Amino acid sequence: MRESFTLDGLVRGELPGLFLITPSIRLLKAAGKRTTVFGELPVTPSTKKLSREVYEFCINNGYRYVPTSPVYFLDKEDYLLHKTVTAIRLRTTLGSIKPEETEPEDFYFRSYEEVMREWKKIPGALQNINYIVDNCNLNLEMGKTKFPLFPTPNNEPSFSYLWKLAFKGWRCDITRSPRLLSTVCVMNLK
């Protein structure tokens, strides 16, 4: 990756076939007003301040916006399990865990009715979701891995090019034997 790489620099360019949905006002400004750029309004009690700021920016500057609902738990009750596992991982007690050490309690899979109740006062937000749904062209087949297209020098097969890059990186480690390097590369690239 180039040292000069920045996300806001990336979104200034062409974004063919890509929807940008972000709560970052900086990224919204960098991307500019386009039909595929949306301010993200997270639908949770813990993110109301952020949502308000993004909403006001979008309204005042002519950007579209959509409500989102971060999901870390299937059900609201799963938060206790998350907190318990976090306590075990941190080797502490449930009562000693700080709020920033866990995901917010309201990041569960909310029902359509809950989202509608939360956002019925915000005009246009849910219509923008329908725009994204109607214009999204993504077909993911269950059980099949999809990799992004990556142009290689001289149209070399991707596996061969990745093999060369991996082996070149491993060669820098002079403490390992070439045979071990080759075996590890083969195992990791399969």
Image: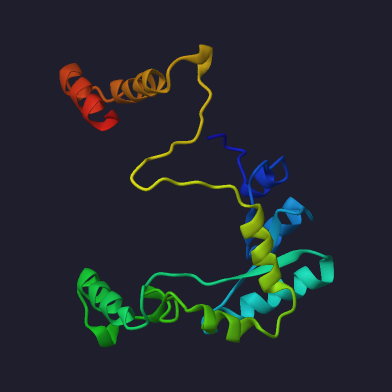
Who's the residue at 62% across and 75% down the image? 50
Q: Quadrant of residue 45?
A: bottom right
Image coords of residue 138 (percent x, y): 54, 47
How far from the left and from the top, in percent, is residue 123?
Answer: 74, 78
Nearest to the observer: residue 33 or residue 181: 33
* Residue depicted at x 64% and y 65%: 129
Residue 109, quarter of the rendered image: bottom left
Q: Position of residue 4 (x, y in %)?
A: 62, 38
- When the figure is inspected, residue 35 is found, relative to residue 128, above or below; the finding is above
User: In this picture, is 101 found above or below 9?
Assistant: below
Name the image colouring: rainbow
Where is 92 relative to 72, above or below?
below
Q: Position of residue 178 (x, y in %)?
A: 20, 17
Q: Quadrant of the C terminus?
A: top left
The answer to whether residue 108 of the structure is visible from this angle is: yes
Let me know if residue 44 appears in the view: no
177 on left or right of 147: left
Q: How many marks?
A: 0
* Residue at screen point 43% across, 39% down: 146
Q: Residue at x 59, y 81 (%)?
A: 116
- Please name whichever residue, 90 or 149, is drawn nearer the observer in this view of the structure: 149
Q: Nearer the viewer, residue 30 or 145?
A: 145
Place residue 180 in its image quadrant. Answer: top left
For residue 68, above or below residue 77: above
Left or right, residue 147 beside residue 89: right
**Horizontal side of residue 158 vs 10, given as left or right:** left
- Residue reaching furthest top? 154
